[in-house]
Amino acid sequence: MPPPTAEFNRMQPSDETMTDPRFTKLAQTLIHYSCELQAGEKVLIEAIDTPAAFTKELVRVAHEAGVVPNVLLKSKEVLRRLLLGATEAQLDLMAASEETYMKGVDAYIGVRGAPNVSELSDVPQEKQKLYERYIWKRVHMEIRVSDTRWVVLRWPNPSMAQLAERSTEEFEDFYFRVCTMDYERMSEALQPLRALMEATDRVHIKGPGTDLRFSIAGIPAMPCDGKRNIPDGEVFTAPVKDSIEGTIQYNTPTIYQGVTHEDVFFRFEQGKIVEARSTATEHLNEVLDSDEGSRYIGEFSLGFHPHILEPMKDILFDEKIAGSMHLTPGNAYDTAFNGNRSQIHWDLVLIQRPEYGGGEVWFDDVLIRKDGTFVLPELAELNPDKLGA
């Protein structure tokens, strides 16, 4: 049978023979490659606004591998209603429940749909901060990220297709091409970049509105090859916390807490964002004032997924854009820790390909990428013409 298009996000038939083969391929990637689950291990599947057909296929593939699955079903509409009246006691109860789920498993798969990307836009800022403190920080940052093997991904729907300015059918084809590419090949190709980043002290980023210098000395570089995010395609580290000086002008739209920001601009002094503006400057600064660490940077990364070329206001895709980089206000990951702690982690993307204004990345006074293309021979396999072939 042909793959579903218009009916993609509706309930699928119960007949198992109707399962889209792309669902099976993606489920196998998540269970076997991303989480490397073995017989007898336990996995928590958190499905947010995701069609039952795919969740069932994940459970089936887990059972087939002898893995013990548990499923937590969620809805953004329900979450909005919970947050509008949320109290600390309520969020503490929610966090305690989710802690129990997370502490009892070896791995976590988060499949996150978004029928309306602005569903939480009218939730007051103080409620958003409570949710981030109790659920995101306490459950995800302190348990899931640190103590489980995990992978998260978006689920395609018409809302995402609209943001990507594609038809529903075209976007579905794009989505599965991106999410089921040969990540083992990517893993091999990115090793020279990882080694180079770990040997680098000084980084210099140049481009329109951007002249930024910082150090990454002594901080590990982490490969992102489908083991944590799907889609994937980056190597990240973190700047030495107080080393950033200069300016950066991002050129990719971003959505945070349901609010869209464009033309985000930061000016840094001794690692701290001392000036910030965007098309929603007031909200931008409210977020950056969330806590002591939110005006410092927790991540620096170079993106190179060969099939992701244009922004679509979905960070799991946009941060992997070929020829991009992101510099992230907020919490640093423990695996590339620079001392910065925060309840926020906001990936903001700068694309440096020529059609986006170009730009350069220098490591220790050596040009490594120009206008989005790696120029060192040992990094050439990460360019789209090679990695996407």
Image: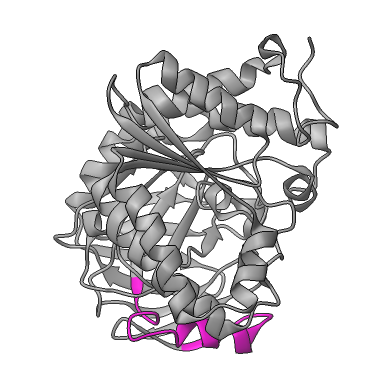
Report which quarter residue 124 is drawn in: bottom right
Residue 256: where, in percent of width, then height?
59, 69
Report which quarter residue 365 is drawn in: bottom left
Residue shown at 35% from the left, 78% from the top? 296
Span shown in magenta = 275-297
Residue shown at 78% from the left, 9% from the top? 1
284 magenta-colored: yes
Residue 268: where, in percent of width, then height?
39, 84
Q: Tell how many labels.
A: 0
22 magenta-colored: no
Residue 257: where, in percent of width, then height?
60, 71
**Camera sees residue 2:** yes
Q: Nearer the viewer, residue 292 or 329?
A: 292
Q: Which of 59 and 164 is in front in this view?
A: 59
Residue 347: where, in percent of width, then height?
48, 63
Residue shown at 62% from the left, 43% from the top? 309
Q: Which of 148 and 197 is in front in this view?
A: 148
Image quadrant holding the C terminus, namely: top right
User: In this rendering, is residue 131 above or below 305?
Assistant: below
* Colouring scheme, one of rainbow, by chain, secondary structure, one colour: one colour
User: In this rendering, is residue 357 above or below 354?
Assistant: below
Report which quarter residue 179 is drawn in: top right
In the rendered view, does 281 fall on the left or right side of 346? right
